[in-house]
Amino acid sequence: MTLLTVINLKSITKYLAIILVVAFAKAVTAQETIEQDIAAIDNKNVQETLAAMDSVTPSTKKRFLIEGVAGVIGDYVILGSDIVSAKAQAKREAGISDISSCELMESLLSEKMYAHHAIQDSITIGDREIEGRTEGQIQYFKNALQTNDDQKIADFYKKENITQVREALNRVNRDGLLAQRMQERITEQVEITPEEVREFYKSIPEVDLPLFNTEVEMAQIVVIPEPEPEEVKLVINKLAGYRADVLDNGADFAAKATLYSDDTGTERQGGVLSLKRNDPFVKEFKDQAFSLQEGEISEPFETMFGWHILYVEKIRGQIRDVRHILLKPYISVAQIEKSKAELNAMRDRIILNEISFGDAAKQISDEERTAENGGKIINPNTGTGRIEVTRLESDMASTLQFLEKGDVSGIIEETDPRMGSKTFKVVYIIDKIPDHKANYANDYLKIKDLALKDKQVKAINKWRNEKIIDTYIKIGAEFKDCDILNAWN
């Protein structure tokens, strides 16, 4: 059975994981991957490779595989080092250690076939989308390397300058996006009916039914200690002073961010950030970034993280390069204890049935997103209230382990990793579903999702088999024993 003819959860999951790992390895991470894919295999080199590997056209010349090339598909060359780096990436990022070189080669062939035929089908990718992804990756590496020096990023990639890095990443991202669009086109019309879901479930042998982890439906009340008004005023005045010093006295904004900002993720780089309108920054921050002109500094403003001032350093089309200084008002021990006591008193009322959990959440919970819904948590991935316990933070998972349907937890103290502040919460278990084998009635939505993925994989498989016939493909001799690649040969 090949990766593309899977019929059970484990096989489908593994197949998708391989595709994602290869895509991630090619587009985002490893230095060695970028070096390989951007080693300037231009069109002339591709044509030379095709000619050297071609065994169809009669010739008296000896045919050979150019050193380092594992295969060719359409106008794309797959390097042997791509296989090595993808395998390492699979183990490092996805914890998958049993992927063979044969399986990875098939995944790379599929990826390049998608991109090749996307071009044939006139699928285009806008420059802005490609450049936006590239800039996001460069910023990611700047944060990882704790630098804002473009030359250090170029040195990391062993390129002469940041322009060469951008050009290289643009090529990689263009191919990745082409492949993604081609897959979307292949599967966009694939739908699943209730009857197909039922037949899919019936086709899985009892012993192969997937095991679903314990899930809970729960609601929560979150209380966040607030600073005293005097502490808020102190922070606002400090930020206003920094702003005035830069505007009136020519002080260096970046230096002040390094010295004073409470944002540990950016303070070493002088508070620098690059963002687009659709980036996942809080609304208040983006509103300021896109309402100011180049060189302007905002007045102090508040977000969920604290108080900021923001300086627009450069505008590059849809991208804003900004610097900011974040200050968090001091929260006293007295304020922390006050919040804890308020939550504890409300918990007592819930236990005594003086108030429902939902009404209590609407009254005092500081998490607006759940408070409006009576504290109920919705899983964003499924749109339902069910959440796998194993996907929760370890402390929360440990707490839920001992709670049953209808129970209210004790006070759970947490430190918000983004804000660095204490929060207190209590949770109510609406329902709890223990570990169990897939059940058609209770797990219909999960089985439906699995059946749809299976049907999509089959659609891709059918498309692949049809396209193999009219696509130039040549695979290196080192893969001759790979049964999984028989169809490609």
Image (cartoon, grey):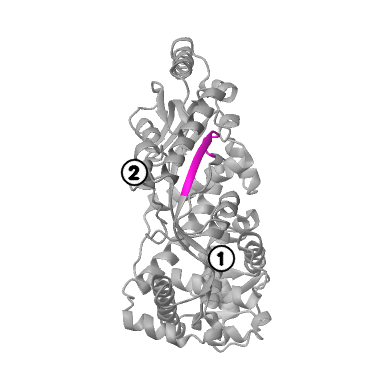
In this picture, is 109 found above or below 228? Answer: below
Specify the amino acid type for callout 1. Val
Q: Give the residues in magenta.
A: 415-427
The residue drawn where x is 63% and y is 41% is: 145
Name the quadrant of the C terminus: bottom right
Q: Position of residue 112 (x, y in %)?
A: 50, 70
The residue drawn where x is 40% and y is 58% is: 385
Label at residue 22: 1
Local crowd at mark 1 within 10 Å, few (<14), some, or many (≥20)? many
Q: Is residue 128 visible?
A: yes
Viewed as shown, does residue 51 lie left or right of 287?
right
Magenta-colored stretch includes residue 356: no
Judging depth in this view, the residue of 277 and 307 nearest the camera is: 307
In this picture, is 131 found above or below 441? Answer: above
Magenta-colored stretch includes residue 422: yes
Q: Position of residue 251 (x, y in %)?
A: 52, 15
Which quadrant of the figure has residue 36?
Answer: bottom right
Which quadrant of the figure has residue 465?
Answer: bottom left
Local crowd at mark 2 within 10 Å, few (<14), some, or many (≥20)? some
Q: Position of residue 237 (x, y in %)?
A: 45, 14
Specify the amino acid type for callout 2. Asp
Residue wearing tag 2: 359
Callout in the foreground (2, 1): 2
Q: Position of residue 334 (x, y in %)?
A: 54, 23
* Tag 1 secondary structure: helix
* Tag 2 secondary structure: helix
Viewed as shown, does residue 99 lie left or right of 242?
right
In this picture, is 132 found above or below 388? Answer: above
Judging depth in this view, the residue of 367 and 148 nearest the camera is: 367
Which quadrant of the figure has residue 140?
Answer: top right
